[in-house]
Image (cartoon, grey):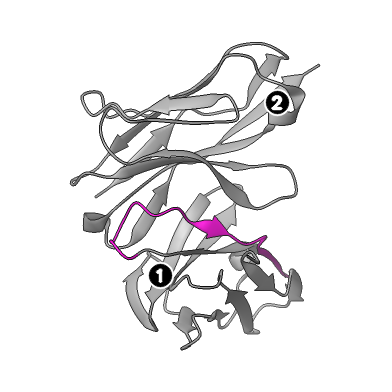
């Protein structure tokens, strides 16, 4: 079945540091890939998505490229801010998954001033 | 447009009781999914409804059930509550007309505590 594996946290960075959160997936079909973010005390919200191979999703300075050859969708940001402190979830969804989105375990990011 | 709303936001129950949680999707969204979020297990898929039909179900016992109404509002019910059912229950809605790839919009969740 479909699955998502993302790096364990927590990840602690200083402000303006470079961020990478690794995400790899297993899927039988051609999934769409997502990064969702959960800020403290808030619900999940979409950060970015990519629907086919080689697509790059981007939002708020975050980027992720859909790599079919490595089955990866790593999240990157060039310069993190304290306000980026949150839990980040990688997820996939496809029709062969039967109307179900599979989430990774989540990676907690702490950014220090 | 109003976002996804969930009621109640907080709930405290005792073991053996049952509970009903409610979710109102974004207007026009016909798909509603439910997830259980716990620190140990992360986000676990419970079930998904589209036009009043359950299209998929996660690996949860039969004590967990749901339904969707003609106006797309959804409820989930947990009977015979156990301590391990304490969690944040999240509802998400989407257009989901293609079977995959649509963005899900999440509500704030219902925090259930079972004593």
Rounded to the nearest angstrom, the CA distance separating label 1 from label 2 is: 33 Å
Residue at screen point 63% across, 64% down: B3
Circle 2 Cα neighbour tier, 10 Å, few/some/many (<14 / 14–19 / ≥20):
many
Q: Quadrant of residue A40?
A: top right
Q: Residue furthest right?
A: A113
- Residue B113 is inside the magenta segment: yes
Residue at screen point 61% across, 47% down: B39
Q: Position of residue B29 (x, y in %)?
A: 47, 70
Rendered view: B86 above or below B15: above
Task: Say left or right for B102 vs B2.
Answer: left
Q: Nearer the viewer, residue B45 or B48?
A: B48
Task: Say left or right for A99 vs B76.
Answer: left
Rendered view: A55 above or below A91: above
Rendered view: A62 above or below B108: above
Span highlighted in magenta in the image: B97-115
| CB-based contact (under 8 Å), mark 1 and mark 2 | no
Q: Nearer the viewer, residue A103 or B38?
A: A103
Residue at screen point 62% across, 84% down: B18
Q: Position of residue B76 (x, y in %)?
A: 54, 78
The chain identifier of the residue carrying mark 1 reads: B
Task: Say left or right for B104 vs A79.
Answer: left
Q: Secondary structure at mark 2?
A: strand
Q: Position of residue A111 (x, y in %)?
A: 72, 22
- The residue that mark 2 highlights is A110
Q: Position of residue A41 (x, y in %)?
A: 75, 49
Numbered label attached to residue B78: none
- The residue that mark 1 highlights is B48
The chain identifier of the residue carrying mark 2 reads: A
- Main SS, magenta region, reads loop
Numbered circles on residues, count: 2
Q: Residue furthest front?
A: B1
Q: Secondary structure at mark 1?
A: strand
């Amino acid at each position: 079945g479909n699955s998502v594996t993302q790096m364990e946290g927590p990840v602690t960075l200083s402000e303006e540091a470079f961020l990478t959160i690794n995400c790899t997936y297993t899927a039988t079909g051609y999934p769409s890939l997502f990064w969702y973010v959960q800020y403290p005390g808030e619900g999940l919200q979409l950060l970015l998505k990519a629907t086919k191979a080689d697509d790059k999703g981007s939002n708020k300075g975050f980027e992720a490229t859909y790599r079919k050859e490595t089955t990866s969708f790593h999240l990157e940001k060039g310069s993190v801010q304290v306000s980026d402190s949150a839990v980040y979830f990688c997820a996939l969804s496809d029709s062969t998954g039967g109307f179900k989105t599979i989430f990774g375990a989540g990676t907690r990011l702490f950014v220090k001033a | 447009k109003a976002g996804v709303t969930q009621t109640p936001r907080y709930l405290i129950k005792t073991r053996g009781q049952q509970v009903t949680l409610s979710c109102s999707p974004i207007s026009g969204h016909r798909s509603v999914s439910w997830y259980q979020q716990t620190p140990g297990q992360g986000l676990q898929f419970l079930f998904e409804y589209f036009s009043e039909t359950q299209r998929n179900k996660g690996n949860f016992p039969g004590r967990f059930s749901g339904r969707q109404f003609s106006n797309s509002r959804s409820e989930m019910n947990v009977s015979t509550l156990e301590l391990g059912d304490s969690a944040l229950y999240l509802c998400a809605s989407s257009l989901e007309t293609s079977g995959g790839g649509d963005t899900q919009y999440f509500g704030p969740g219902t925090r259930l505590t079972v004593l």
